[in-house]
Image (cartoon, grey):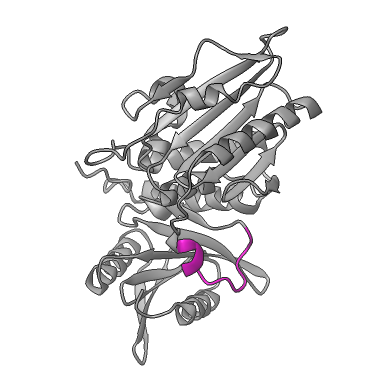
Amino acid sequence: MNHRVVSSQNNSDAKISRRIFLKCTRTIIFMPAGFFQRKWCGWFLALILVVQLPAGPPAASKDLSPKVADFTPPGWQIYERAKQFTPQNLYEQINGRVSLFLAYDVRQLTFVSFVQDVDIARFVNLSIYDMGEPTNAFGIFSVERDPEASTLNLGRAAYRSGANYFVWQGRYYIQVTASEDTTEMQHIGLVLARKAADSLPDAGEPVWGLTALPPTDRVPLSVQYYKVNAMGLDFMHNTYTAIYNKGNARVTAFLSRQQSAESARSVMLQYAGYANRYGKGCDRLKGGEVELVSCDMDGSFDVVFTKGRLVGGVASVANRRLAVKAAIGMREQLPSGQ
């Protein structure tokens, strides 16, 4: 079944969905939004992602139950037992966020709750998501990341928010959440996060977009990976986005690697078709061998280009001239033959 995000029945719904997506992306990336606003945006991003079970046989997941039992802090105990969830029953543990994890092909969740011996109302929960491969693990970590939080030297990337810890380690995404934010709980959470990260294997497989996106002017911690429906567009798959400082403006850039140059051009044409349908149309700009499509999105501008099998550009830029300049500059920094 083809799950479409953009409804053909209502143009305004399509534009609103995309605008909220871009606003939420920027909120999660670099705005000091409140907890509720960030969680609402995360919920919205989960809604517009394709909900489907992983295709084909799942990658083998290890039984981590015995391992996490060894992490029990002194003076604490495991509440009930360590539990494991598959894509088929993941909703039993994280019902409100399950679609987001399914969109990144989650393979397994190992969950354990530690409670204090003398007061079981105090708890620290450990969740280890096996995402099958590092790119998927980075993707879910990146869209949930709070860049305002304190970064940590754990795994490949990590941060702390109060007494809660979030870690990307190879194919795994680790969450440690505590019942209260105290110095004691911060210490317990850090020890748990470190033990979990150190115990999980990481063969070091690269995540392509982290090095493919040009580093010049890129806002730190702004790279995100969308396996499906990037920027609210159902034809944008395997896409990385990042925020760039361009003069006094911040620009959202995107980059996707397709199977071939022909498929990259097909994506650009679909982008133009979307803009013609829901915006005010597109102009083709050509200089030498470089061809771009400038799209008027009724108040902002998107500029799309291809380079071999890469398709990229900028989105939701208020100034057309800046959008074209930023897209050309980005294209020039991309190596050929990727």
Q: Position of residue 25 (x, y in %)?
A: 53, 51
Residue 298 visible at all: no
Which residue is drawn at the image coordinates 36% and 54% (left, top)?
Answer: 233
Which residue is drawn at the image coordinates 48% and 23% (left, top)?
Answer: 66
Which residue is drawn at the image coordinates 49% and 76% (left, top)?
Answer: 330
Which is nearer the eye, 69 or 250? 69
Considering the whole magenta stretch, tell me its main secondary structure.
loop
- Please tell me whether residue 210 belongs to the stretch shown in magenta: yes
Is residue 228 shown left or right of residue 189?
left
Work out whether 176 lies above or below 27: above
Q: Which residues are magenta?
A: 209-220
Is residue 166 shown left or right of residue 132?
right
**Residue furthest to the left:** 1
**Residue furthest to the right:** 183
Q: How many marks?
A: 0
Work out whether 3 lies above or below 289: above
Quadrant placement of the N terminus: top left
Which is nearer the eye, 324 or 93? 93
- Please tell me whether residue 213 belongs to the stretch shown in magenta: yes
Q: Position of residue 56 (x, y in %)?
A: 21, 41
Work out whether 299 lies above or below 190: below
Work out whether 291 lies above or below 64: below
Quadrant placement of the C terminus: bottom left
Which residue is drawn at the image coordinates 74% and 26% (left, top)?
Answer: 185
Q: Position of residue 239 (x, y in %)?
A: 40, 58
Q: Position of residue 91 (x, y in %)?
A: 39, 24
The picture quadrant where one finds residue 306 is bottom left
The picture quadrant where one finds residue 273 is bottom left
**Residue furthest to the top:** 118
